[in-house]
Each structure stands twice: as C-alpha cells, then as structure tokens.
Image (cartoon, rainbow, N blue to C red):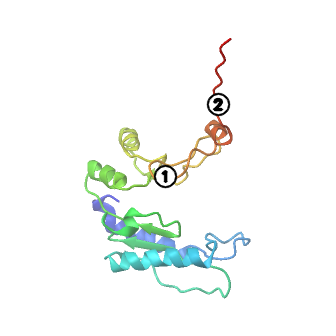
Amino acid sequence: VEHSIYDKFVAALSARADKLRVGDPTNEKTEIGPLISRTHRDRVAGYVNIGKNEGATVSTKDKGTQFKQGFYMNPCVLSDVTPKMRVFQEEIFGPVVCVTPFKTEAEAIALANDSIYGLSGSLWTSDISRALRVTYAIKTGNMSVNSTTSVHLEAPFGGLRLSGLGRELGMQAMNLYSEVRNVFIKF
C-alpha cells in the first residue's frame, strides 16, 4: 500500500475485516466459511504467530471463535510486514492479508516480484498508464486492475514460478487434458 495512505488504509481494512461474518457456508449471510481441516486451520494460525514473532502487527481484533465444530478462523490483517518475513514470502491460503508500505512505483513492483511465487495479484489505481506499466512489470500468472477478481471462466488461470500448475479455464485448459504426440513415417 502506498506509504502516504498506509495507516488510513490499514485501519479501514482492519475495520472491514473485523465485520466479516464467519459462519456456516450454507447460511447466505456468511462471508467466510471454515477452512478444510484442523491441520489447515492450525497451519494458517501458525503463520499468524510466525508473523507476530517476526515483527508484524495483528491489526484486527482477536474475537476468538464461537463455533464448537468446524475449522473456523477469523480474518486477520497483518501490518508492518517486511519482505524478509515468512508471511510475506510464503503462500498462506487462509483468511490472512499482509500489508507492506511502498513509496515509489518501482519499489511496489520490486516488492511484488520479490517472491518465488506468482499466482495472482490485484492493482488499484486511477491511472490507466500506470495500470498497464505495472501489470506488465509484475510477474504473476493473473492480474486484475481495480478488482479482486482475476479468475474468469473464459480466461486461463495459473501462476508463474512455483505457483500453480499449468493453466486451468479458457481454451488453454484443454492442454491439461491432452497429450501431444508426433508421428513421423517415411515410406
């Protein structure tokens, strides 16, 4: 997040995360359901602890859990995250967002590319020239601009580097189900 709005953004994001409704996924009012298993929930919670131990700040409220069954976890915003932290470098796959400030466009691009992963990203800007420049420079399989949705049925989805495997969705998905062969015959 751009340094000039960092504190205000973290406060607003944390306030919104604190209001998200965690609950039964069959209830239409639920915004966040349970994680898939106890192991997964414990792994994600472990990342929050790793972040805290490495100097990140938990900017959301610790509401505990109200559920006796299921593997629920409240959303967590980790702020003051630096590129050297594991929570910055590793894929968490849970209701945790890490927030890191930047001062320049070049620094933002460098931060985004400072990872062995590159599944998906989201850029928010009112400057279309910047959007084109930055989305081209960030090495990720999917990017969205001014949206949190980079997955569309008609477009290929997959990451770069150590994220994702192949391409799903779109016409490129057919390659996942095909094995190309070459036969040469000389008479």
Q: Is residue 118 visible?
A: yes
Q: Residue at x 52, y 54 (%)?
A: 148
Residue 59 is situated, as x and y percent measured from the top left of the image, at 40, 76
Determine which quarter of the picture holds residue 10. bottom left
Residue 34 is situated, as x and y percent measured from the top left of the image, at 63, 74
Q: Nearer the viewer, residue 42 or 150?
A: 42
Secondary element type, mark 1:
strand
The circle drawn on residue 94 is none
> In the image, is 87 to the left or to the right of 102?
right
Residue 68 is situated, as x and y percent measured from the top left of the image, at 66, 88
Residue that mark 2 sits on: 181
Q: Amino acid at mark 2?
A: Arg
* Neighbourhood count class around disc 2 (C-alpha, 10 Å): few under 14, some 14–19, many 20 upward: few
Q: Nearer the viewer, residue 58 or 4?
A: 58
Q: Is residue 18 visible?
A: no
> In the image, is 103 to the left or to the right of 147?
left
Q: Amino acid at mark 1?
A: Ser
The circle drawn on residue 120 is 1
Determine which quarter of the picture holds residue 170. top right
Marks counted in the figure total 2
